[in-house]
Image (spheres, coloured by chain):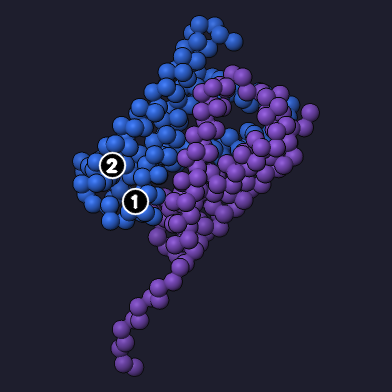
Amino acid sequence: MQSLINFTYASTHYRPREGMIAFLLHRISGLATLLFLSIHIVDTSLVYFYPQYYNDFIGLYRLPGFMLAEIALMAGVIYHGLNGFRIALFDLVLPSAWTIQRERLSVRLTILLAAILWLPAGIIMGGNFIGYTFLGWH
Amino acid sequence: MPARAPSPAPLRRSWLTVAWTLMRLSAILLVPLVWGHVIIQDMLVGVHKISLDYVAMRWASLGWRAYDAALLCFAFAHGSNGLRQVLEDYIHGQTARRILRVALFLFWLSITALGAAAVIGGVRQ
C-alpha cells in the first residue's frame, strides 16, 4: 500500500519525461484493454451458452457512451501495440539502444505514429458515432 | 556459530524470466492479430452490423475460428500476466503475492474456458 501512496504522490508531484509518460500510457491502455477483453470474451461466449441474449448484449455496445469508449479503446490498442513492439525490439534485439536519448526519441516517434494510425479509425468510427447517434442511421 | 555471508542466488531461468520473454514474443505476434481484428470488426464492419447471424457466418469458416482461438490464447494470457506485473509493483508480501497469483490464474482459466467453449462449440441456434 505504501508503494501505491508513493506512486500516487510521485505521479502528481513530479513532472514526467518521455520514459515515464510511455510507461504510464502503456499501463493505463493495457489495463483498459484487459477490462474490455474480459467482458468481450464473456459476451462472445453467449453465442454458445445463451444465444438468445447475444444480440441484446451487443446492443449495449451501440449506446453512445460505449461508442465513444470504443474510439478511445482503439487509441489505446494502437499505442499499446506500438509501444510494446518498441519495448520488445529494444529488449530482445537491441538492448544497447536503451539510452536516454534513444528512449526520448523513440517514445516521441511512438506517440506520433500512434496518433497518425489512430486518425483513420477516429474519422470512420467518429462518423459512425455521429450518424447513429444524431442522424438517425440504423 | 560463525557469521556467514549469504551465498549469492544461483543464476537460473525462473518462470518469471520465461514470462518476461513470452510477454515480448506474444507482443510481436499480437500486433498484427489484434490490429487485424479491430480494423475488421470495429472499423470496417462496425458494432451495428454484428449479430448472432454475423458470428455464425464468420465461424462457419475454420480459418476465422482458428484466428479467434489464437487471439483468445495469446491476448488474454498476455493481459492476465500484465495485470500480475502491475499488481506485483504494489503488492510485495510473499503470501499476498501467492494469493494474487492463484487468484489471477483462476481468473485467466475461467474466462479462457468460457471463450474456448464458444470458439469450439460455435453458435447454437
Q: Which residue is mark 2?
A: A106
Name the residue rendered at 67%, 24% in the picture: B54
Quarter placement of the N terminus of chain B: bottom left
Q: Amino acid at mark 1?
A: Phe
Q: Is residue A53 visible?
A: no
**Hey, which quadrant is residue A38 in on the image?**
top right
Residue nearest the viewer, comparing B88 with B58: B58
Which chain does the residue under circle 1 lie in?
Answer: A
Which chain does the residue under circle 2 lie in?
Answer: A
Q: Is residue B41 above or below residue B66?
A: above
Q: Is residue A17 visible?
A: yes
Residue nearest the viewer, comparing A138 with A113: A113
Q: Judge from the rendering whether residue B40 lies leftward or rightward of residue B2; answer left or right.
A: right
The image shows residue A65 at horizontal and vertical percentages of 48, 21
Which chain is the one coloured blue? A
Q: Amino acid at mark 2?
A: Ser
Q: Residue furthest front?
A: A93
The image shows residue A104 at horizontal and vertical percentages of 24, 43
Name the residue rendered at 46%, 14% in the picture: A127
Q: Residue furthest right?
A: B125
The image shows residue B65 at horizontal and vertical percentages of 67, 38
Residue nearest the viewer, comparing B118 with B30: B30
Which chain is the one coloured purple? B
Classify 10 Å Cα crowding around label 1: few (below 14), some (14-19), many (20 and above): some
Q: Residue furthest top?
A: A135
Classify 10 Å Cα crowding around label 2: few (below 14), some (14-19), many (20 and above): some
What kind of element bears circle 2? Answer: helix
- Decide which of tag 2 and tag 1 comes sooner along the chain: 1
